[in-house]
């Protein structure tokens, strides 16, 4: 079984390590490689993967949107998002999916029960592609009390409206005032990601004790946002779980096998600590 991830640049990706470990653990023959694909070569590279009998591949920055035009079919959720992160090739046809939102949800469910998630007042910071996927998955799962805070408020308005959410849309200043009212606060912006580790979109100092702060970033493992939330007495969840679960959902589509996510979260966490 031949698998890959395509992106540009791609050398820092932990996906080859993760999927090659799972292939081995599941007793499957095959390999998962990282392919650096410049934007102007996307179409031809995809055709090449199909011709070389790849079973599928992951798609990462900057190809998640542009890939869609080259696929034979795209699931509704990925079409709505306008972004694909997983492609399955079956009988020469390419099918597109997006497992990012459900990957986040599965990670969240390691910290909160189903009921807690649906009863929670949730605040999503950011209204870009990642926020859209996460809001969609949370909503399909039964959570409705979802508010969105974004620097550009109109994008938050659109996200609330398109999903029919019962929460509010607001700018970052308003969210900063209200942060103590939420049970779960999720950072989906790139603020705080390496090398800009001292930045944050919102200051979590006033989060409610016992609430949960989640970040989709995993480099660093503990962002400024999570550090402040922890100091406030909140539980914290970094982006390693989301990364591992989005990969596991893709792996299941390619192989019909369920990989070990818990030990992979530990392995990647250890690996990140050494960097
Ligand atoms: P992704 O697909 O990873 O979500 P994106 O679609 O570019 O990336 O979205 C990035 C998000 O981070 C957006 O919500 C963006 O806010 P705007 O919609 O106002 O652009 C947010 N973001 C990026 N830089 C930011 C900054 N310096 N401060 C606050 N928010 C920021």
Image (tube, rainbow, N blue to C red):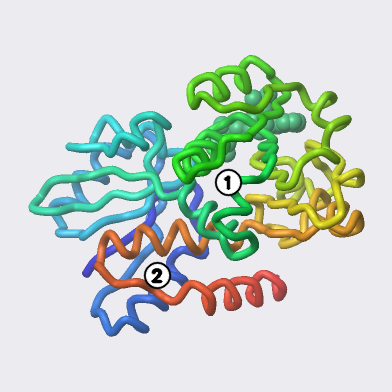
Q: Is mark 2 within 8 Å of ligand 1?
A: no
Query: Contact (CB < 8 A) between labels 2 and 1?
Result: no
- Within the displayed image, which quadrant is ligand 1 positioned in? top right
Q: What residue is disc 1 on?
A: 118
User: Counting other residues with Cα less than 10 Å from the Cα at mark 1, is it few (<14), some (14-19), or many (20 or more)?
Assistant: some
| Horizontal arrangement in the rendering, residue 210 relative to residue 157 (left or right) | right
| Horizontal arrangement in the rendering, residue 113 relative to residue 213 (left or right) | left
The location of residue 224, given as percent across then percent down, is 83, 51
Examine the rendered structure and indicate whether residue 252 appears above or below residue 217.
below
User: Counting other residues with Cα less than 10 Å from the Cα at mark 2, is it few (<14), some (14-19), or many (20 or more)?
Assistant: many
Which quadrant does the N terminus fall into? bottom left
Residue drawn 34% across the image and 67% down it: 32
Q: Tell me the mark number nearer the camera, choosing from 2 and 1.
A: 1
Examine the rendered structure and indicate whether residue 128 appears above or below residue 224.
above
Is residue 8 at all visible to an observer of this figure? no
Q: CA distance from mark 2 to mark 1?
A: 31 Å
Residue drawn 81% across the image and 57% down it: 210
The location of residue 141, given as percent across then percent down, is 47, 46
The location of residue 265, given as percent across then percent down, is 57, 72
Count the numbered circles shown. 2
Examine the rendered structure and indicate whether residue 186 appears above or below residue 3.
above
Is residue 200 at all visible to an observer of this figure? yes
Q: Is mark 1 within 8 Å of ligand 1?
A: no
First reached walking from the N terminus: tag 2 or tag 1? 2
The local secondary structure at tag 2 comes to helix
Which quadrant does the C terminus fall into? bottom right
Residue drawn 26% across the image and 62% down it: 254
Residue drawn 53% across the image and 75% down it: 262
The local secondary structure at tag 1 comes to helix
Choose top left, top right, bottom left or bottom right for residue 53: bottom left
Q: What residue is disc 2 on?
A: 19
């Amino acid at each position: 079984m031949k698998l890959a991830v395509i992106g540009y640049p791609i050398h820092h990706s932990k996906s080859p390590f993760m999927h090659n470990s799972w292939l081995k653990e599941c007793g499957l023959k095959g390999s998962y490689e990282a392919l650096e694909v410049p934007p102007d070569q996307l179409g031809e590279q995809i055709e090449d993967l199909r011709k070389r009998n790849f079973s599928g591949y992951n798609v990462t920055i900057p190809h998640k949107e542009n890939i869609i035009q080259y696929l034979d079919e795209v699931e509704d959720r990925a079409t709505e998002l306008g972004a694909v992160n997983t492609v399955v090739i079956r009988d020469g046809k390419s099918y597109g999916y997006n497992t990012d939102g459900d990957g986040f949800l599965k990670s969240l469910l390691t910290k909160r029960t189903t009921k807690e998630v649906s009863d929670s007042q949730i605040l999503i910071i950011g209204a870009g592609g990642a926020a859209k996927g996460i809001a969609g998955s949370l909503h399909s799962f039964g959570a409705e009390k979802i508010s969105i805070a974004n620097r550009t408020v109109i994008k938050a308005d659109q996200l609330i409206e398109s999903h029919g959410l019962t929460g509010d849309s607001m700018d970052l200043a308003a969210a900063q005032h209200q942060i103590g009212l939420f049970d779960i606060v999720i950072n989906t912006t790139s603020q705080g990601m390496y090398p800009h580790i001292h930045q944050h979109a919102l200051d979590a100092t006033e989060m409610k004790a016992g609430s949960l702060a989640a970040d989709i970033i995993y480099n660093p493992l503990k962002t400024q946002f999570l550090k402040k939330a922890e100091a406030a007495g909140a539980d914290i969840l970094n982006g390693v779980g989301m990364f591992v679960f989005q990969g596991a959902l893709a792996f299941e589509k390619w192989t019909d096998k369920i990989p070990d996510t818990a030990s992979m979260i530990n392995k990647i966490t250890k690996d990140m600590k050494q960097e």
